[in-house]
Image (cartoon, rainbow, N blue to C red):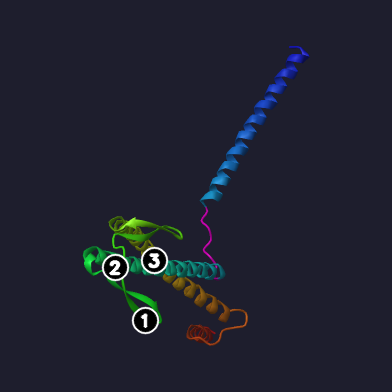
Amino acid sequence: MDRDDEEDGETEEREEKNSEEGMSGGSGKGKEGSAKGSRKAPPPTLEEAAEALEVYKGHLNQMASQAEILQNSLKEIDKALSTLTGLRENKEEAEILVPVGAGCFIYAKVIDVNTALIPIGRDIAARLPLEKGIAKLEERKKEVSELLDKTTKEVARLNKEVGQLQQYVEVLYRQQMSKDSHGDGGCSGCSSCSSNHIQRTDDE
C-alpha cells in the first residue's frame, strides 16, 4: 500500500469517528433539551400571585361595566320598541308624552305615524317606515341580548377565578407570615413551638 492510500484510510477513520461523536453529542443534547422541556414551571410567588390577582380584578371590573352598559342599552331598545309598537296599534290616537327634562313631560301629537328615525350605525340614523324600523330594533335587541349573555358568563367565570386566586394568595400570605415568625429571629411563642421546646427539655 503506498503513502496516498494510507492517508486516505486515516482520513476516512477520522471522519467516521467525528461522525459518531457528533451523533452521540447531538443525542445527548436532545435528551437534555427534552428533560428541560419536561420540567414543570415553579409555582408563582406571593408577589406574582398578588399581581395576577390585581390584573384579574381589573379585567373583571371592566367586563362588569360592559355588562351594565349593555343592560342599559337593552332597556332603551325595549322602551323604543314599546313606543313604536304603540304608535302602530293606535294611529288614530297618536298622542305621546315627550320628556323635556327635570322629570317633566308634555303632551304632543305625532304628525307622521308611518315613519321613524332609526339608528343604523354610530351616530347615524335613517328615516325608515315604521314596520321596518321596528324590525331593525328587534334585530338590534337580539344582538345586544346575545352579547349581554356572553358578557354575563364571562363575568361569572372571572369572578370564580378571582375568588380562587384570592384564596391562593391568602394561603401564600399565611405561609410567608409563618416563615417570617419562625425565622432567625426566633418564634413569637406559638403553641407548636412551645410544645417542641417542652419536648426537647424533657429529653435533656
Q: Circle 1 — which element?
A: strand
What's the residue type where badge 2 is placed? Thr
Is any atom of residue 160 visible in this view?
no
Q: Residues within 10 Å of mark 3 (few under 14, many from 20)?
A: some
Q: Which residues are magenta?
A: 39-46
Q: Is residue 87 on the magenta stretch?
A: no
Q: Which residue is mark 3?
A: 70
Residue 164 lies, with reference to residue 183, above or below; the image says above
Q: CA distance from mark 1 to mark 2?
A: 18 Å
Asked which quadrant contains residue 99, the reply is: bottom left
Q: Which residue is mark 2?
A: 83
- What's the residue at 39%, 65% (across, down)? 157
Q: Compare residues 75 and 109 and report the one nearer the observer.
A: 109
Q: Which residue is outermost to the front? A: 111
The image position of residue 197, as x and y in percent, is: 53, 85
Please report contact status of discs 3 and 1: CB closer than 8 Å, yes or no: no
What's the residue type where badge 1 is placed? Cys
- What's the residue at 64%, 34% (across, down)? 22
Q: Which residue is mark 1?
A: 104
The image position of residue 151, as x and y in percent, is: 39, 63
Q: Circle 2 — which element?
A: helix
Please report contact status of discs 1 and 2: CB closer than 8 Å, yes or no: no
Circle nearer the N terminus (3, 1): 3
Q: Which residue is outermost to the right? A: 3
What's the residue type where badge 3 is placed? Leu
- What's the residue at 45%, 68% (across, down)? 60
Q: Which residue is outermost to the top? A: 1
What's the mark number on residue 154? none
Q: Residues within 10 Å of mark 1 (few under 14, many from 20)?
A: few
Q: Compare residues 181 and 7 and report the one nearer the observer.
A: 181
Please report contact status of discs 3 and 2: CB closer than 8 Å, yes or no: no
Q: Compare residues 39 and 154 and report the one nearer the observer.
A: 154
